[in-house]
Image (cartoon, helix red, strand yellow):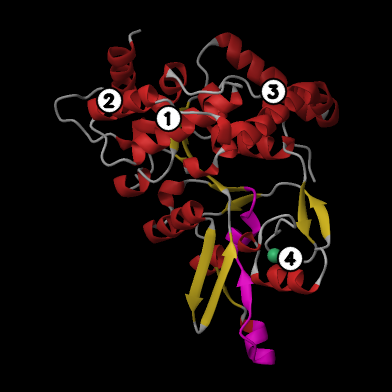
Amino acid sequence: MSVVFPFSAIVGQDEMKMSILIAAVDPSVGGVLVFGDRGTGKSTAIRALAALLPKMRAVVGCAYNCDPEAPDSGLCAACRDARATQASLKSRQTPVPVVDLPLGATEDRVIGALDLESALTRGEKAFEPGLLARAHRGFLYIDEANLLEDHLVDALLDVAASGQNVVEREGLSVRHPARFVLVGSGNPEEGELRPQLLDRFGLSVEVKTPEDLETRMTVVRRRDEFERDPEAFVAKWKRKDGKIRRQLESAKANLRDVTVPDATLERAAQLCMALGTDGLRGELTLIRAARALAALEGDDSVGDTHLKRIAAPALRHRLRRNPLDDAGSTTRVERAVEELFGA
Ligand SMILES: [Zn+2]
């Protein structure tokens, strides 16, 4: 495996880093959509985060990397059957996967398909797992999500939300676990996602090429240092990456115990009403993301500070165009936050 740029060495891009960490703590937040120019390190950040996570235990020989500790409902059919006859499932350590969904990938390749070879040679109806199977327990990265066909994005979002991939076709009926954090990148200049799809992504962030001199110099210096001697660079950042790993692990462990007071729910509802976001998805995401943020910071209850910081990523992609207000969506969210919470 090639050496990956350390997460903690990524300069700036705080909103993107926060959002990815939140999605990793609570995948039910619904993934992250990253808008920005090429070369702003969108895919670097995902790879970096996956690389700092501890290796996971996976069942030997399973195409879905099933977790040997998972309850039966979280296993694929083969592992479920194996568990019924064996005392324990044999497992191995494997890195947390980051699967790239290339542009132009067919539905069969993504979702999985009938294994034609075994169908033809042995007359068996076998399932050939797709990219969703490989992404189980890891990250699925879609470059240029806005260029993907709507029906494919829709199917992906369904699987991401349910954690199950259900394939019914050609007399084949397969269901397998597919829990992954969905991260999509988009270039705002090339096609738009339909608002209905946009709304189904949990968080959205905008990344820009840094404009101040100091930051640009630091970015180039670190990149250069990394490329000249990757191992030494990674060693230098190991402690900082370790700190983030521990933060993430304790956030996952404590998430269930973080409380959401009624006052916070009320604030979230007021904010969504002020912005006129459709439906309840925005509010639910806002609360879940704020709770994951509180867990990351070691707080045991969600308050205004968490809501304020996550408001723009949770809501900016859910605003309807307002013909009387041509301010950008980020500005509109920031304005509403300021009016409601005070500066
Ligand atoms: Zn399995």
The residue type indicated by label 1 comes to Pro
Report the front residue among 30 and 131: 30
Q: Quadrant of the C terminus?
A: top left
The residue type indicated by label 2 comes to Gln
Q: Which residues are magenta?
A: 117-138
Q: Is ligand 1 closer than 8 angstroms to the Cβ of mark 2?
A: no
Residue 255, compared with residue 195, is above or below; it is: above
Q: Residue under circle 4?
A: 62
- Front position among marks 1 and 3: 1
Residue at x 68% of width, y 40% of height: 50
In space, the residues marked 2 and 3 are separated at their CA atoms by: 37 Å
Q: Position of residue 9 (x, y in %)?
A: 69, 23
Q: Position of residue 184 (x, y in %)?
A: 49, 44
Inspect the magenta stretch and tell me whether residue 95 lies in it.
no
Q: Residue under circle 3?
A: 9
Residues marked 1 and 4 touching at CB (< 8 Å): no
In space, the residues marked 2 and 1 are separated at their CA atoms by: 17 Å
Callout 1: few (<14), some (14-19), or many (20+) C-alpha neighbours within 10 Å? Answer: many
Marking on residue 313? 1
Q: Residue under circle 2?
A: 270
